[in-house]
Every structure is written in C-alpha cells, then in structure tokens.
Image (cartoon, helix red, strand yellow):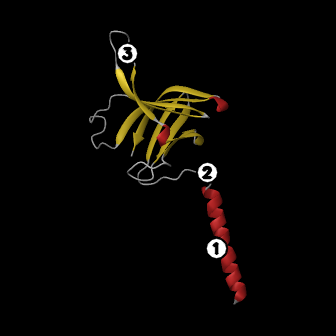
C-alpha cells in the first residue's frame, strides 16, 4: 500500500512540475484580455492585452509578438496618453495615441477614427503599431491592426 501512495505522490508532483515548466514565460488569456493582429512586409504582428480584472491591475500588460514569437512586453502602467498631430501646419489633424518605453524598447499605438459602421457590436477597434526594439533589430512603423475584446 505504501508503494502505491509513493507512486501517486510522484505522479502528482511530476504533473505539477511539468505544468509549471510549460506555463513559464507564456502569456495566458483571461476573460478581460484583448487581442490585436496585423500584417506588414510579410510578417504577422500580434498584441496580447493582458488584463487581470475590469479595473486596472499593476500586472496588466501589452505583449507584442512577431510571427508567433513574443518580442517585448510593456506594463500597462507605463503607458502615457497623448494627442499627436498627423496633419500639416494650418491643417492640423490630431489622433489619440498611447506611448510606452522600457529598457528594451519603445511602443506607440495610434488610434485612427473609429466608427460604429466598422463594428456595430462595439467589440472591435483599430490601431496602428509603431515599435522599436533595438537589441533585437526591430523597427516597424504603421502596422494596421484589428483588435477584439
């Protein structure tokens, strides 16, 4: 009987260790998350917007992947909101932006005008991604992305 208990305990321990190893370093979706995807120059860009709850949480993040490989993560708390002029002098045209930086790189989301005609259910929105990750030789501008809650 003792042998069976040891085998069961070893099996349970093995399962826990394997689960922990498989989960390490990977982002996992929760009900509050969002997801964006777009393509430019033959590469697929995606952003997982990790939300822990409806209200802000210190561990909320935005993780960018290229061709399915995570390249950089920014904490939600590091983002600043701004209005950026995309027009010319005398014909200013401002759009909402969100900008963040960390020691690895910089990111900017530019939000073009959104309309209910594009998405009547209100679950889809659009953004343009600007990303610089010098240590990985990544610099991309204006990736048009479609996002969903």
Q: Is residue 12 above or below residue 145?
A: below
Tag 1 and tag 3, C-beta contact below 8 Å: no
Residue 83 lies, in percent from the top left, at 38, 25
Sequence-wise, which precedes: disc 1 or disc 3? Answer: 1
Task: Tell me the element at label 1.
Answer: helix
**Residue 70 tag number:** none
Q: Which mark is residue 25?
A: 2
Mark 1, Cα crowd under 10 Å, few <14 / some 14-19 / many 20+, is few
Q: Nearer the viewer, mark 1 or mark 3?
A: 3
Residue at 40% across, 28% down: 82
Mark 1 or mark 2: name the one nearer the start of the chain: 1
Rendered location of residue 12, percent (x, y): 64, 73
Q: CA distance from mark 2 to mark 3?
A: 41 Å
- Residue that badge 1 annotates: 12
As drawn, 144 above or below 11: above
Disc 3 element: loop
Disc 2 crowd, CA 10 A, few/some/many (<14, 14-19, 20+): few
Instruction: Say which residue appears at 36% left-offset and 37% top-offset.
Output: 125
The residue positioned 71% from the left and 88% from the top of the image is 2
Disc 3 crowd, CA 10 A, few/some/many (<14, 14-19, 20+): few
Real-space CA distance between mark 1 and mark 3, rounded to the nearest whole angstrom: 61 Å
Residue 20 position, x and y percent, is 63, 61
User: At numbered mark 2, what does the secondary structure look like: helix, strand or loop?
Assistant: loop
Relative to 127, is 149 above or below? below
Residue 119 falls left or right of residue 68: left
| Residue 87 numbered mark, or none | 3
Q: Quadrant of residue 121?
A: top left
> Is there a contact, CB below 8 Å, between mark 2 and mark 3?
no
Q: Quadrant of the N terminus?
A: bottom right
Q: Are marks 1 and 2 in contact (CB under 8 Å)?
A: no
- Farthest-out residue, top: 90
């Amino acid at each position: 009987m003792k042998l069976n208990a040891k085998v069961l305990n070893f099996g349970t321990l093995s399962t826990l260790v394997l689960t922990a190893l498989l989960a390490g370093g990977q982002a996992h979706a929760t009900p509050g998350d969002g997801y964006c995807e777009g393509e430019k120059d033959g590469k697929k860009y995606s952003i997982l917007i990790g939300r822990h709850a409806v209200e802000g949480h210190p561990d909320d993040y935005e993780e960018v992947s290229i061709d399915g490989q995570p390249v950089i993560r920014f904490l939600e708390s590091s983002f600043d909101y701004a209005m950026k002029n995309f027009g010319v002098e005398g014909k200013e045209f401002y759009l909402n932006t969100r900008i963040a930086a960390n020691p690895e790189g910089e990111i900017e989301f530019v939000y073009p005008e959104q309309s209910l005609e594009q998405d009547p259910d209100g679950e889809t929105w659009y953004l343009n991604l600007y990303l610089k990750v010098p240590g990985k030789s990544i610099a991309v501008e204006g990736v048009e992305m479609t996002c969903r809650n």
